[in-house]
Amino acid sequence: MLISLFGAFESGIIYAIMALGVYLSFRILDFPDLTVDGSFVTGAAVGAIAIINGVPPIIASIMAGAAGFIAGCLTGFLHTKGKINALLAGIIMMTALYSINLRILGQPTASMLNESTLFTQLKSLPSTWAIVLVMILVILFIKFLIDYYLKTEVGLALRATGNNKIMIRSLSANTDFLIITGMGVSNALVAFSGGLIAQYGGFADVNMGIGMIIIGLASVIIGESLFGTKTIVRATFAVIGGAIIYRIFVTMALRVDFLDTGDMKLITAILVITALVAPRMINARKEKKRKIRKRSELMQRKAGEA
């Protein structure tokens, strides 16, 4: 059990990078981006093929992120310049990426079991905590970069674009450029995570991105429900925590006798529904208790005056 939870924590940190990318598009830009299902595989495919062809794992991971950046920018371009609905633009790009990813891989699955990846190098170190410690440093570095970026002038304009595009455009801001670059950064993080997951698992598969947007949204929603979103620093921390907690929940759920690996999507759906509904039910209950208490106090005050 402890080994399973340790593995869930490891993979949760890697998936947290993808969740941060989803947070940028879903929360900051208010853009329902389905490109994620394709760009995640793009990162895995580019990273895997680069490593198979002798590229150092770190450089291959950066290449994966760059490929995702291009995919995200194309989605943003379709939406802003092509005037295509945001949801439809993501679907179109996700569909196109399936064929592109298959072209990159050359086959449905590419194995890296005999290759030197970032994680095989880390596993060769004496400490069993090497992977966790390195990935914690990586995710914290990315988190602090996002926190800093969103507090800069460009970052504030990006946040304003997501909140009220018409208002920020009236202030002469180039909202099209902001959306395109924002989508690029978002999918760069998703693809970078995909490249790392491929190295972590030892393979890249053309279908490994199916449902990835739901996993990202689950991480964001669970994190926000548990940790809150009062500040950007707290929100990004919540997303990371949500991704880790999601992986732990899924791992624990799959250990139940009547559930198997094929039920993972159902578990994800239940977790998302719970994370969405539970806070509203709790708040409604608190509000009801507050009204009852207020009514009781008012009645006592009237009785005292009489």
Image (tube, rainbow, N blue to C red):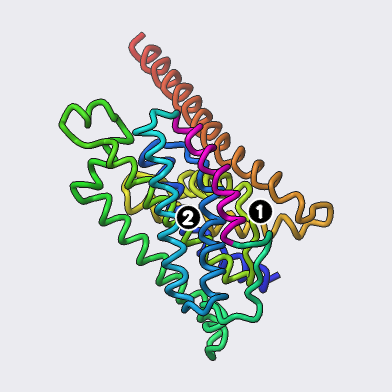
Q: Quadrant of the C terminus?
A: top left
10 Å neighbourhood of mark 1: few (<14), some, or many (≥20)?
some
Which corner quadrant of the image does residue 299 belong to?
Answer: top left
Q: Residue furthest right?
A: 258
Foreground: 116 or 162? Answer: 116
Q: Which residue is mark 1?
A: 207
Residue that protrudes farthest toward the left in the picture = 171
Image location of residue 55, percent across then percent down: 48, 77
Tell me the CA gap for discs 1 and 2: 15 Å
Q: Is residue 102 magenta?
A: yes
Quadrant of res 1: bottom right
Please, what secondary structure does the residue beneath circle 1 have? loop
Compared across the picture, whether 35 is left or right of 182 comes to right
- Does the segment drawn in magenta span residue 180? no
Which portion, as a residue range, is magenta? 85-104
Three-letter code for the amino acid on which mark 2 is drawn: Val
Foreground: disc 1 or disc 2: 1
Taken as a whole, is the magenta stretch helix, strand or loop? helix
Q: Are marks 1 and 2 in contact (CB under 8 Å)?
A: no
The amino acid at mark 1 is Asn
Q: Position of residue 178 (x, y in %)?
A: 28, 42
Sequence-earlier tag: 1 or 2? 2
Query: Residue at image x 70%, y 51%?
Result: 264
Question: Left of 285 or right of it: where is 168?
Answer: left
Give whichever of 202, 29 is nearer the camera. Answer: 202
Q: Nearer the viewer, residue 19 or 235?
A: 19
Q: Residue 270: x and y, percent? A: 66, 42
Q: Secondary structure at mark 2?
A: helix
Residue drawn at the location 69% of the way across and 59% of the way down:
252
In the rendered image, residue 216, in percent from the top left (x then y), is placed at 53, 49
Where is mark 2, residue-wise? 190
